[in-house]
Amino acid sequence: MDTEQMDQILTIKRTMNYKRASEELGVSQPTLSYQVKKAEEEIGFRIFRRDGKTISLTPAGEQFCISLREIREDYKRAVERAQNIDGKYSSSIRIGLPFRSAIPLLPQAIRRFYESTSDVSVVPEFHVYGDLSSFLSGSTDMEFMLREEAESMKGVDVVPLYRSGISLIVAEDDPLASRERVGEGDLQWRTLMVGGGSPPALRRVQQRIISSGRVDYFNSPDHDTTLTNVAVGSGVCLAPDFLHEKGDGFRWIPFDCPEGFDCVLALRGDAQPHAREFAVMLSDMHSHEG
């Protein structure tokens, strides 16, 4: 199946109308029907059911289109990245990270690196927090991680970045929002949002607070849901400072506790010299900043 057939199938899925899809794609309906039939013969199952002028997805077709959209987007991104590099750079350094705030000085480091090495491209690749598939498959040269995660992996060099503390997140109109620092005693009789894939150090703090018996708690599935609950006043939450995106509309207050997070770069053992050079630069810049 080629990209043209992928686009045709996804357009039909989006419009659920062969005539409209053929008009958008600039092909005849018979040609479109032929291409879909050809694709279905190749993959071995029907994608669409046709009942007169009405079409619907088969169960297999529905699942297939979900995966097909992801494949098409991955292909598009791969082409765009290659186009950006072609003719301008001799190689690239790929850095995996879950959010921009994870490596605060990354833009400055890239600019400094380009001043001395103009033919190597530095490419940030964002992914869901905790998803290391790109790093494990070799698609990225280095990944933002917590030290304990990186040290548990074989064939990985650990390059330190910075120490991240823990903050209490409250709505901007919360009574605690004016405080410069808070502790466990400030949370009495409040509702603490917990869960959502919290790192071990944060879970220890949460459990210690909950075990006091003076704090209610509410299980929240992920960080975005937690922030929504905080925004509407349903509770407060504790989070690693490395999650803090400036201007997010919340008040992040440093939380008094000994726990924290050692944030590092995990560098592949077979990483190219330029990648190691860049990782060391990032480490030095963060150490001086701290």
Image: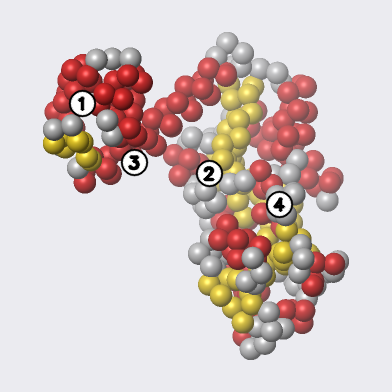
Q: Residue furthest top?
A: 87
Q: Which amino acid is tagged 2?
A: His
Say which quarter of the image contains residue 121: top right
Q: Judge from the rendering whether residue 72 lies leftward or rightward of residue 189; answer left or right.
A: left
**Front disc: 2 or 3:** 3
Q: Which amino acid is tagged 1?
A: Val
Which numbered disc covers residue 127? 2
Disc 2/disc 4 C-alpha distance (Å): 19 Å
Query: Can residue 284 be seen by looking at this rendering?
Result: no
- Residue in the foreground of this view, choosing between 18 and 188: 18
Tell me whether the residue at label 2 lies in contact with that at label 4, contact meaning CB atoms closer than 8 angstroms: no
Dot 2 or dot 4, earlier in sequence: 2
- Which residue bears the numbered disc 3? 66
Dot 3 or dot 4, earlier in sequence: 3
Disc 2 crowd, CA 10 A, few/some/many (<14, 14-19, 20+): some
Residue 257 place in picture, x, y as percent: 75, 72
Q: Judge from the rendering whether residue 82 lies leftward or rightward of residue 273; answer left or right.
A: left
Give me the residue at 34% from left, 41% from top. 66
**Front disc: 2 or 4:** 4
Which numbered disc covers residue 36? 1
Disc 1/disc 4 C-alpha distance (Å): 45 Å
Disc 2/disc 1 C-alpha distance (Å): 32 Å
Q: Judge from the rendering whether residue 27 lies leftward or rightward of residue 257; answer left or right.
A: left
Residue 220 place in picture, x, y as percent: 53, 68
Question: Which corner quadrant holds the N terminus?
Answer: top left
Give me the residue at 69% from left, 84% from top. 189
Dot 3 or dot 1, earlier in sequence: 1
Disc 4 crowd, CA 10 A, few/some/many (<14, 14-19, 20+): few
Q: Which amino acid is tagged 3?
A: Ile
Q: Judge from the rendering whether residue 103 lies leftward or rightward of residue 221; answer left or right.
A: right
- Which residue bears the numbered disc 4? 248
